[in-house]
Image (tube, rainbow, N blue to C red):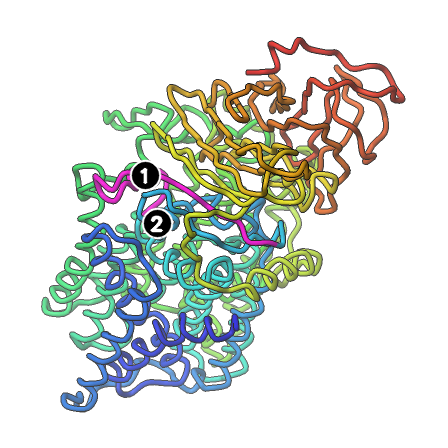
C-alpha cells in the first residue's frame, strides 16, 4: 500500500505535471535533462500552487490540495501541448551525448541509494515533527484547533497522536517557527509529510539529493561527451555531497539543487523560455535559503546579452515569490525580513559600519582565532572537509577547469559561488549542519570539473602545463595540509560560538582532530557502517508511508502534546495503553531511555480506569498542569496514560503539576543536568517505579565513573532509578539524571544526593 501512496506523490502530484511542462517548454531535450526537469518543474509549480490557497483560506494543507494543484498544472500543460505546441527550439548548449538514458538511470539509482542509506542526525529521521523544519510543516498540516494528527513513529513501532494548538492569525500562526526556518523549505517538506507521513522524510531526502546530483551531472556533461566519464563524475559528486552535506532532511540540499537548476537554465540556451524557467526555480530557491539572493548578479550576467531574458527572469521570480513574501509580511510586517538575523550574538565594526552577526574571524576581528573545541577555525576546516569529502581526483579536475574555462565564463561563476562561501569561512565556528551551506556554492564546481576533464581528455594541455598542474595540486591537496596545519597553533576565541556542540568528530581530542583533517585521499569517503545503521530506519519509515490521519474525538495513546504557544489549555479524551511509554525511548520503559532536551515525558499508571480517560493540559506563565479524570469505573487493570510535552529549543517549564480525579499525586521527578555547570531541567514525571536498561542505539543512559561525582563502575548495566547520577554518553556535553527514588546498594562510592525541593524544579 505504501508504494501506491508514493506513486501518487510525488509521481502524479509532481512528476506528471513537471513532465508535461518540460515537454512543452523544452521540446528538444536529452533523457537526463527530461528526467531532472520533470521533477524540478513539478516542484516549482505545485509547491507554491498547493500552498497559496490553503494558506489564504487558513485551512490545512491536505493531499487533496496537493493532488489537485498537480492535476490542474498537468491539465494546463497537457492542453498547451495539444493546442499550442511550441515550434523549433534550440537543444541544450554544449555536449549532450553524455546525457543518455543510462546516465539518467544511474542518477536516479544514486539518489535512491543515498536516500535509503543517509544516516539520520540525532532524531531527525525518528521523530516526524521534532526537529526543524518539520515542525513548520506540522503547522501547515494542522488547522490550529488541537484536533490532532496520527502518524507512524518508527522508534516506537506504533502510530502516535500529535496534538497542537496555535492561532491562525497572523500568517497562519507560523511566525514563531519562521524565526528559525524558512517558508520555502517548510512548504516543500509539508507536501512530503502531508502525503506520506514519516515516509515523506525519505522521499524528501531522495528529492533533494536527486536535484543536486542530476543538475550536477547536467552541468558537468556540457563539456564531456563520454557517458562513462559523466557516470563516474555523478558517483564521485554524489559521495562527496553525501559526506559533506547530506543528512535527513537537509533543506540546504534543496536550496542547492534548485540553485544548480537556475545556473543550468541560464546557460542552457539563449531563449526567453529558459530565463522564465530559471526565474521559476529561483523564487523557491530564495524562499528556502535567502542566502541564495547572492546568485542574482551572476545570473543576470549569464542571461545577457539583451534585456528580455533578464527581465523575464526577474518578472517570473517576483510573481512566484508572492506567496512567500505574503507569508513574511503577515508574520513579521516586512516581506523582505530575514528573521534569523535577530539571533546575531556578537557586535562587529568593519570599515566604519556597525553590525551584528556570529563571531567573525580576521580581517573583521583583529587576529585569526579558533574555537575552543576545534584545532582550526572554519576558514581552514571547511576546505579540509571538502578535500576529504570529494577526494583529490575531483579537485584536480576542478583546478584544471579553473585554468581552462576562460575568463568570460569564469567571472560570473566566481561571482555565483564566492559570496556564500566567503561568509561561511569568515565565521569562527559552525556545526556540521551549517557547514553544509557550502553546498550552495558548488554548482560552478561541477561546471569546472567538466571543463577540466574535457581539457585533460582532449590533450589541450601540453606536458609542461600538466606537470605544473600536478605539482600545484600536490602542494595544495597533500603537502600543505600534512606539513603546515598539524603545527598550526591559533589563540582560542573567547566569544560564545554558534551552537558549539559535538560534530562528526565525536569526542576526539584536538590532536586527533588535527590528524583527521590533515589526511588526504584520492577518492570520496564512504562509510559502510553509516549506511548499515541508516537502512533499517529509512526502510521502516518508507514502508509506513501514509498521509497523517486526522484524529477522531477519542485519541489513541501515546500522545505528543505541542505546548509551544501561550496560553495552552486543551481537554482531550484518550484511549489508554497497556504499557508505559516514555518519550522518546526506544520501545518500553524497561528497554532504554534516550534523553531529549525538547520533551518532558509524563507516564501515569491508572489502575482504576475503564480504558478511557479525559486529560486537560494547561500552561500558564511557564507552569504546566496535567489534570486527569479517570471516571473511577474500571476493574483495577493497570493501564497507562503516556504524554510527551514538546517545546522546541528545550522546555522552560517552571513545574509540572499532575492530578488524577482532582487528587494531587507525588510523581517521581527526573532532572537531567547538561554541561559542566549541571544546569537542571525537567525531563520525566511518573507515578510508578521506573527501571532503565541500556538502549541498543548508542544513545543510552548508563552509570559511569565521573571525576567529581563517581557513581560506581557498572557501565552499561540496567539500574533502578535512585538519587544517583547517570551519565548520558552522547556527544561532548555530559548529562546527568537525578531522581527522588530510593537507590539500591551498588558497587563503588555513593553519589551525592540532593533535596527533593531542588529536584522538583
179 within the magenta span: yes
Within 10 angstroms of label 2, few (less than 14), some, or many (20 or more) residues? many
The reply to whether the magenta stretch includes residue 602 is no
Q: Which of the 4 image quarters holds residue 741? A: top right
Left or right: 718 in relation to 106: right
Q: Nearer the viewer, residue 59 or 336?
A: 59
In this view of the protein, can residue 387 be seen by the observer? no
Q: Residue at x 34, y 69 (%)?
A: 40
Q: Percent from the top left, x then y, of residue 627?
A: 48, 27
Q: What residue sits right under mark 1 in the picture? A: 166
325 above or below 567? below
607 relative to 242, above or below: above
Rendered location of residue 438, percent (x, y): 43, 50
- Quadrant in which the C terminus is drawn: top right
Q: Which mark is residue 142?
A: 2
Region in magenta? 158-182
Amino acid at each position: 500500500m505504501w508504494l501506491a501512496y508514493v506513486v501518487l506523490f510525488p509521481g502524479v502530484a509532481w512528476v506528471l505535471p513537471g513532465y508535461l511542462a518540460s515537454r512543452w517548454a523544452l521540446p528538444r531535450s536529452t533523457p537526463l535533462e527530461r528526467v531532472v526537469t520533470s521533477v524540478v518543474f513539478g516542484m516549482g509549480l505545485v509547491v507554491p500552487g498547493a500552498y497559496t490557497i490553503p494558506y489564504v483560506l487558513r485551512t490545512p494543507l491536505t493531499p487533496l490540495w496537493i493532488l489537485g494543484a498537480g492535476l490542474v498544472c498537468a491539465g494546463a500543460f497537457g492542453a498547451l501541448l495539444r493546442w499550442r505546441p511550441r515550434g523549433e527550439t534550440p537543444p541544450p548548449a554544449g555536449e549532450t551525448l553524455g546525457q543518455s538514458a543510462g546516465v539518467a538511470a544511474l542518477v536516479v539509482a544514486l539518489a535512491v541509494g543515498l536516500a535509503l542509506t543517509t544516516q539520520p542526525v540525532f532524531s531527525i529521521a525518528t521523530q516526524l515533527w521534532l526537529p526543524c523544519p518539520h515542525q513548520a510543516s506540522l503547522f501547515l498540516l494542522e488547522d490550529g484547533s488541537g484536533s490532532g494528527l496520527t502518524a507512524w513513529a518508527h522508534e516506537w513501532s506504533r502510530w502516535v497522536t500529535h496534538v497542537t494548538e496555535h492561532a491562525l492569525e497572523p500568517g497562519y500562526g507560523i511566525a514563531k517557527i519562521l524565526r528559525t526556518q524558512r517558508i520555502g523549505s517548510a512548504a516543500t517538506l509539508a507536501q512530503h509529510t502531508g502525503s506520506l507521513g514519516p515516509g515523506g522524510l525519505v522521499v524528501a531526502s531522495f528529492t533533494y539529493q536527486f536535484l543536486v546530483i542530476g543538475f550536477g551531472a547536467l552541468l558537468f556533461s556540457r563539456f564531456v561527451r563520454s557517458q562513462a566519464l559523466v557516470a563516474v563524475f555523478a558517483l564521485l559528486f554524489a559521495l562527496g555531497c553525501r559526506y559533506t552535506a547530506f543528512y535527513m532532511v537537509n533543506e540546504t540540499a534543496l536550496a542547492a539543487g534548485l540553485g544548480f537548476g537556475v545556473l543550468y537554465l541560464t546557460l542552457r540556451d539563449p531563449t526567453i523560455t529558459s530565463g522564465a524557467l530559471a526565474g521559476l526555480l529561483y523564487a523557491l530557491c530564495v524562499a528556502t535559503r535567502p542566502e541564495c539572493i547572492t546568485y542574482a548578479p551572476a545570473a543576470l550576467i549569464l542571461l545577457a546579452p539583451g534585456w528580455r531574458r533578464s527581465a523575464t527572469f526577474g518578472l517570473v521570480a517576483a510573481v512566484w515569490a508572492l506567496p512567500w513574501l505574503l507569508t513574511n509580511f503577515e508574520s513579521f510586517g516586512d516581506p523582505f525580513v530575514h528573521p534569523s538575523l535577530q539571533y546575531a550574538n556578537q557586535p562587529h565594526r568593519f570599515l566604519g559600519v556597525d553590525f551584528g552577526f556570529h563571531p567573525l574571524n580576521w580581517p573583521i576581528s583583529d587576529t585569526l582565532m579558533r574555537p575552543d573545541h576545534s584545532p582550526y577555525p572554519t576558514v581552514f576546516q571547511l576546505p579540509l572537509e571538502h578535500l576529504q569529502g570529494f577526494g583529490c581526483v575531483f579537485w584536480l579536475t576542478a583546478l584544471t577547469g579553473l585554468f581552462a574555462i576562460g575568463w568570460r565564463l569564469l567571472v560570473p561563476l566566481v561571482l555565483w559561488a564566492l559570496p556564500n562561501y566567503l561568509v561561511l569561512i569568515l565565521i569562527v565556528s559552525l556545526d556540521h549542519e551549517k557547514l553544509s551551506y557550502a553546498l550552495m556554492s558548488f554548482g560552478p564546481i561541477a561546471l569546472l570539473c567538466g571543463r577540466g576533464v574535457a581539457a585533460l581528455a582532449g590533450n589541450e594541455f601540453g606536458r609542461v602545463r600538466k606537470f605544473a598542474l600536478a605539482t600545484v595540486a600536490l602542494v595544495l591537496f597533500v603537502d600543505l595540509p600534512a606539513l603546515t596545519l598539524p603545527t598550526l597553533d591559533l589563540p582560542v576565541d573567547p566569544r560564545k560560538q554558534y551552537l558549539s556542540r559535538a560534530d562528526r568528530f565525536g569526542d576526539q581530542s584536538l590532536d586527533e582532530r588535527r590528524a583527521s583533517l590533515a589526511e588526504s585521499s584520492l577518492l570520496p569517503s564512504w562509510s559502510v557502517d553509516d549506511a548499515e545503521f541508516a537502512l533499517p530506519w529509512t526502510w521502516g519509515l518508507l514502508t509506513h508511508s501514509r498521509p497523517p490521519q486526522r484524529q477522531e474525538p477519542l485519541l489513541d495513546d501515546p500522545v505528543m502534546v505541542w505546548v509551544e504557544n501561550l496560553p495552552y489549555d486543551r481537554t482531550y479524551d484518550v484511549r489508554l495503553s497497556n504499557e508505559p511509554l516514555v518519550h522518546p525511548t526506544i520501545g518500553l520503559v524497561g528497554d532504554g531511555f534516550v534523553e531529549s532536551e525538547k520533551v518532558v515525558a509524563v507516564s501515569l499508571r491508572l489502575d482504576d480506569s475503564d480504558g478511557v480517560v479525559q486529560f486537560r493540559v494547561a500552561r500558564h506563565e511557564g507552569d504546566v498542569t496535567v489534570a486527569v479524570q479517570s471516571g473511577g469505573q474500571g476493574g483495577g487493570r493497570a493501564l497507562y496514560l503516556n504524554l510527551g510535552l514538546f517545546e522546541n529549543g528545550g522546555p522552560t517549564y517552571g513545574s509540572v503539576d499532575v492530578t488524577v480525579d482532582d487528587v494531587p499525586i507525588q510523581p517521581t521527578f527526573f532532572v537531567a543536568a547538561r554541561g559542566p555547570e549541571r544546569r537542571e531541567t525537567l525531563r520525566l514525571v511518573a507515578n510508578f517505579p521506573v527501571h532503565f536498561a541500556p538502549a541498543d542505539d548508542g544513545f543510552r543512559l548508563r552509570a559511569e565513573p565521573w571525576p567529581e561525582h563517581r557513581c560506581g563502575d557498572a557501565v552499561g548495566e540496567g539500574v533502578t532509578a535512585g538519587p544517583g547520577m547517570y551519565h548520558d554518553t552522547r556527544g561532548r556535553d555530559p548529562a546527568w539524571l537525578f531522581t527522588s527514588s530510593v537507590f539500591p546498594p551498588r558497587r563503588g562510592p555513593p553519589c551525592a544526593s540532593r533535596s527533593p525541593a531542588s529536584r522538583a524544579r
